[in-house]
Image (tube, grey):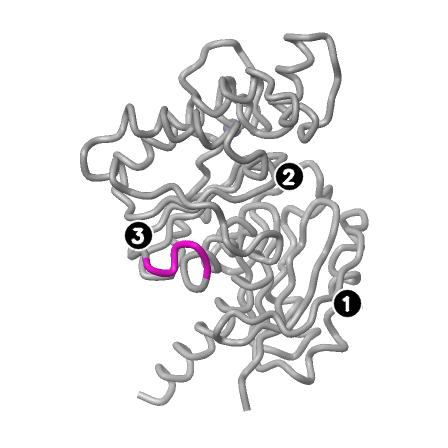
Amino acid sequence: MTSLALAVDIGGTKIAAGLVAADGTLVERRRTATPAGPSILPAVFELALPLTHRAVACGIATAGTVDRLGRIASSTDLLTGWAGTDVKGTAERTLRLPGVVLNDCHAAGVAEARVGAARDARLALVVAVGTGIGGAVCVDGRVQAGVTGTAGSIGHLPAPANTGARCSCGALDHIEAHAAGPAIERAHLRATGQALPLAEIGRLGSPVIAEAAALLGRVLAGAANLIDPDAIVIAGGVSMLGSVLLGPLEAAYRAETLPGPSAAPLLPAALGEDAGLVGAGLEALSHLENGSSCAAS
Ligand SMILES: [Zn+2]
């Protein structure tokens, strides 16, 4: 019988749960709205408990920075009171399954690197551009979380701009403050006086998209010059703008990369909004496998 992992993805607006097979197939999916901080884990368990009898392990992807013990080291303003939560310990006790907890962008990176757009890449940089900008560096399908769980935070690289735009982290002129969805909407409002949603700005082909894309392309070029990936995956809602964004992004990327990383393809994500769930499930199954092989040796 195929082993399945119970997978959970906790985001700022919704919580999703499902069962994931080792080939990345998502067998079942359920979702609910994300409640206020203290009610998040109870909502997770209500959603996930009916699936535990079919699962051998549990993987939880969540917004925020996750430390090595599976606790939330820091969190976005969208999840008030989430920082400090011992997600791994509480989930393992409640769900009665061995568990792993990882950042949601890291989980999406694992999914794209193992079964998605970067499945043929050895070193993949996965970038998610949505209401924020996150990322993951994956080597041979394993995410590099760094010492404190912060690695891959490409949204908090400095943008080649000096307008004093305030980033969600508090710093000025990080790329997230220039190229995430809300930043593009603000730029359009400043330029035209019109407050429009991102999709509409994309339909109009507003020049503010090309400006944001060029800044992001330069930042990605810097990141690629540092780590020399063999593929870069662009995910997230902003990437759905398509060629109006990806054209200028790629031009700026090619203009500033060194000869090696200049050859790396920029690929659209393959897994869409399921990437976090799939990655959490795959991570849980591989941890279980590694754990049992260690125990057997
Ligand atoms: Zn920042």
Q: Which residue is mark 3?
A: 123
286 vs 95, left or right, is left
Q: Magenta: predominant secondary structure element?
A: loop
Numbered disc in front, either 3 or 1:
3
Quadrant the C terminus occupies: bottom left
Q: Residue at x 69, y 72 (%)?
A: 28
Q: Which residue is mark 1?
A: 47
Name the amino acid, label 1: Leu
Numbered disc in front, either 2 or 3:
3
Compared to residue 294, the image places residue 65 above or below, namely: above
Using a 10 Å C-alpha cutoff, classify the residue at mark 2 as few (fewer than 14 neighbours), some (14 to 19) or many (20 or more). some
Name the amino acid, label 2: Thr
Name the disc covering residue 76, or none.
2
Name the amino acid, label 3: Leu
Q: Secondary structure at mark 1?
A: helix
Which range of residues does the magenta coloring cover? 116-120
Residue 38: percent from the left, percent from the top?
78, 52
Q: Residue at x 28, y 25 (%)?
A: 256
